[in-house]
Amino acid sequence: MSNEPESNAIRASVAGLLAWLVPGLGHLYLGHRARGMILLVTITATFWTGVAIGGVRATVDPQERKLWFAAQIGTGGNTIVALALHRRVEQSLRPEETSDYVAHWLSADVGVHYTGIAGLLNLLVILDAIVRADRSLGDRRGREKPAETIP
């Protein structure tokens, strides 16, 4: 019984980490398959739609858009992959192409907003996974108690 709070904390930590790494994965880990798949598809599609609208060069840029990047990193693995693509595109260009690049302002801003919102939504998903991990263990303990001891 003394390991119960520790295993509860580990389970909640793993669910939170997985939810950050891939949106919805924390819920899948906890056994909430439908919820996990809905979150995975919705947040991932929102993020990559933003990248498609704004382009990988203008959308995920930690140098030019620091605050938006802080929001985008909430999607974890999606942002890491998009950042790797951003850097790969930047390295493949000649220096004169890099300095003259100007993104179409509207599409770049819309793309940044999509990806930032996806990251902020995933922060809620992470918190939900952590709470569900904690609650599901608490529910199991409650069911194991005899009916006489429950007030």
Image (spheres, rainbow, N blue to C red):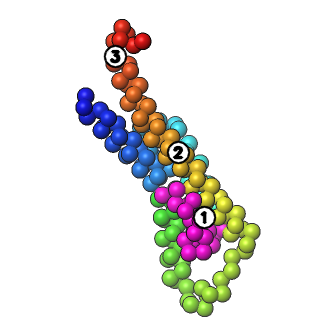
**Disc 1 to disc 3, C-alpha distance:** 48 Å
* Residue 57 seen in render: no
Q: Which residues are magenta?
A: 53-76
Viewer-nearest of discs 1 and 2: 1
User: Which residue occupies the extreme left position in the image?
Assistant: 2
**Residue ID for mark 3:** 145
Q: Earlier in the sequence, mark 1 or mark 2?
A: 1
Query: In the figure, 108 relative to 145: above or below?
Result: below
As helix, strand or loop, the secondary structure at mark 3 comes to: loop
49 or 146: nearer the viewer: 146
What residue sits 57% from the left and 59% below the top?
71
As helix, strand or loop, the secondary structure at mark 1 comes to: helix
Q: Is residue 111 magenta?
A: no
Three-letter amino acid code of the residue under disc 2: Val
**Residue ID for mark 1:** 68
What residue sits 25% from the left and 31% below the top?
2
**Disc 1 to disc 2, C-alpha distance:** 18 Å
Q: Is residue 73 magenta?
A: yes
Viewed as shown, does residue 77 lie left or right of 124? left
Horizontal and vertical percent position of residue 85: 51, 71
Query: In the figure, 144 relative to 42: above or below?
Result: above
Place residue 111 in its image quadrant: bottom right
Q: Residues within 10 Å of mark 3 (few under 14, many from 20)?
A: few
Q: Earlier in the sequence, mark 2 or mark 3?
A: 2
Viewed as shown, does residue 21 lie left or right of 113? left
Q: Quadrant of the N terminus?
A: top left
Three-letter amino acid code of the residue under disc 1: Trp
**Residue ID for mark 2:** 125
Three-letter amino acid code of the residue under disc 3: Lys
Query: In the figure, 10 relative to 151: above or below?
Result: below
